[in-house]
Every structure is written in C-alpha cells, then in structure tokens.
Image (spheres, grey):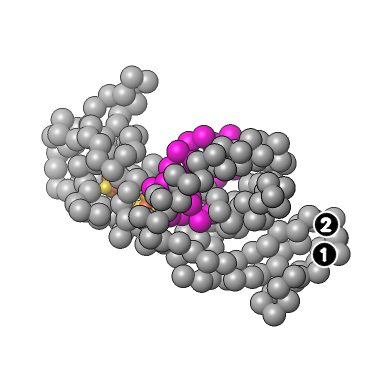
Amino acid sequence: MLLMGVRFIHKIGIMCVKSAKCNIMFSFGKLIIQTAVIKIETDREKIAAYAEIKADENESFRTYLQNRNSQMVDQMVHELNALVEPQVDCTACGACCNGLMINVTQPELESVAAHLAMPNDLFKSQYIEESLGGMMIINTIPCHFLHEKKCTMYEHRFKECRDFPHLHKPNFTDRLFGTLMHYSICPIIFNVIEQLKIETAFLNVKQ
Ligand code: SF4
Ligand code: SF4
C-alpha cells in the first residue's frame, strides 16, 4: 500500500532527492517537511518474519534514538503515526487484544456494563480482577471481548485499547522498549519504526 508520507530534514537548503514526487516546505531553523511516497506493509506474517531478521538492527536503533533529541523524535513519530494509523485496519488485526493487559477505570466499567445491559457487580465479577498494583484489569488474556480478530464492543472499548500503540503521545523515546516489544505484531508500530529509521538517517549511519 502506498500513501503520502513525510520527510524531515534538519539541515537548511537540502534539495528534494525525489523531486518528481515531492513538495518541499523550507523553514529556516526548523524542520523541513516534504511529502513523498512511502510504502506500508500490513501483512502480519511478513512483519513477523522481518522482526526476526531485524532484531539486532532494532536494538541498535533503540540506542540510536535514545541519543537523539526527544522532542524532535516525538514530532517525527506523531507525523508518521498520523499517516500510517489510518491506513491500518485494526478491526482486521486484533493482535494487541491477544496480548495486552488492559486497565479499566470505574467510569469505563460502568459504561461498558451499561452497554452490555449488565449490573456493575456482575460485570466486575465476570470480567475484572485486581492487578498487583491495585488497578482493575481485564481478567483474561486474550481479552474476553475479542472474537476471532474483532473486538465485539469496538465503539465502547477502553481508553487503554484506544491509546495503543501510544504513538500519538509525548516522550516516545522513554517507551522504546515497550514499543519495540510489539514491533513484530503491530503493523502500525512496524511501519512507523521502519519509516523513522529513514527519517532519522539511522540507515545512512548504519551503512
Ligand atoms: S493497534 Fe496494532 S496490533 Fe492492535 S489491532 Fe491495531 S494494528 Fe493490530
Ligand atoms: S476491549 Fe476490545 S479492543 Fe480492548 S483488548 Fe478487548 S477486544 Fe481488544
């Protein structure tokens, strides 16, 4: 799948190397953003295979990112996520629902119980347990509400589910370990990370 992507260049005056495909916005002293065509991989078998091949590379990339400017990395990740995330159909994936521990707040418990026409106490006894840290969590992994690859209450899913893989949040470099842990299963993470390797010039440095 192809989509319009971004390029971030940190030096002033660099010309677009793919001029046939790019529009360039020059901004002195700031990021220069140019649009380009990037390829999105959504085949989860291929992604899992790439993850094995790229395990060492990803470890190096983690170290590389930890030595970059965190705010600059955040800006790149947010831009890339905004491009990639709409191109990936989570309702046809559900991989994270097979492995995440989902925190639930009291208002969420009440809202979902109402949606399922269940008393709060019954919902809690059937679906919730207390974590070691005293939080309410869904008591099964995979999640109760996953049927085949689909969430059976997608429009009512918990905030934790909506937020995953957290690429819209600040301080991405503080979450590298957890993010890369899900690189092999989440097409959104995979594509953002692979594009980020290009945008941060990691692949040039590595060669
Ligand atoms: S967030 Fe990632 S792992 Fe979860 S359903 Fe969407 S693409 Fe799949
Ligand atoms: S509530 Fe839905 S989206 Fe959240 S983990 Fe369960 S199945 Fe996945």
Residue 64 shown left or right of residue 116 in the figure: right
Q: Which residues are magenta?
A: 168-192
Quick check: is 201 in the magenta stretch? no
**Residue 126 occupies which quadrant of the picture?**
top left
**Residue 161 occupies which quadrant of the picture?**
top left
Residue 176 shown left or right of residue 148 in the figure: right
CB atoms of marks 1 and 2 within 8 Å: yes
Question: Between marks 1 and 2, how big is the CA–CA gap?
Answer: 6 Å
SS category of the residue bearing label 1 = loop
Residue at x 81% of width, y 69% of height = 15
The kind of residue tagged 1 is Ile
Q: Which residue is mark 2?
A: 11
Residue 12 in the image: above or below residue 158: below
Chief secondary structure of the magenta span? helix
Quick check: is 179 in the magenta stretch? yes
Answer yes or no: is residue 188 visible. yes
Residue at x 73% of width, y 76% of height = 19
**Residue 69 occupies which quadrant of the picture?**
top right
Q: 62 or 101: nearer the eye?
A: 62
Residue 156, numbered label: none
* Residue 99: percent from left, percent from top: 31, 39
Q: 64 or 12: nearer the eye?
A: 64
Residue 14, numbered label: 1
Residue at x 35% of width, y 55% of height = 45
* Residue 160: percent from left, percent from top: 39, 42
Residue 78 in the image: above or below residue 21: above
The kind of residue tagged 2 is Lys
* Residue 14: percent from left, percent from top: 82, 64
Q: 10 Å neighbourhood of mark 1: few (<14), some, or many (≥20)? A: few
Q: 91 or 181: nearer the eye?
A: 181
SS category of the residue bearing label 2 = loop
Answer yes or no: is residue 173 visible. no
